[in-house]
Amino acid sequence: MIKLERWQTLSKRDQLAHIASEIFRAKLANDQNTRNSVIERAMELIDLTLQDPKWRDNPLMLLYLRSELASIYLDKSRDLEEIIKIL
């Protein structure tokens, strides 16, 4: 797990790229357990991002993304394509 201090040194673009990478990995996962683990990792990265002062003025997109990921995590029938479209 990346530390908050290290995460905060990344640009907004790099932070979003790491989150997007995890979402794409989840889409490619071969089984439900792997998919869930990768979605959990993406949500952890979003949580770190929300703690970064760079996002303090406009966290809405991150909160929406986290909410959608949580919905997909809980409703196994939903497809990650919906989230990939907004990235």
Image (tube, grey):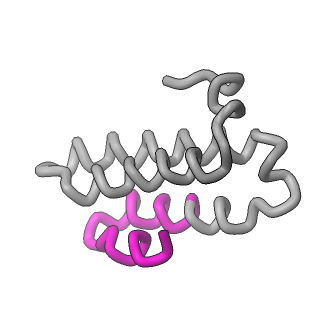
* Residue situated in front as seen by the camera: 51 or 14: 14
- Which residue is found at the position 76% from the left and 60% from the top? 59
**Percent from the top left, x then y, of residue 83?**
43, 71
Vertical comparison of 72 with 32: above or below: below
Main SS, magenta region, reads helix
**Percent from the top left, x then y, of residue 13?**
60, 53
* Residue situated in front as seen by the camera: 28 or 17: 17
Q: Is residue 13 left or right of residue 20?
A: right
Q: Is residue 66 left or right of residue 25?
A: right
Q: Which residues are magenta?
A: 66-87
Residue 53: say if magenta.
no
* Residue situated in front as seen by the camera: 78 or 3: 3
- Which residue is found at the position 56% from the left and 46% from the top? 14
**Percent from the top left, x then y, of residue 42?**
46, 46
Vertical comparison of 80 with 27: above or below: below
- Which residue is found at the position 38% from the left and 50% from the top? 21
Q: Is residue 76 left or right of residue 65?
A: left
- Which residue is found at the position 55% from the left and 41% from the top? 45
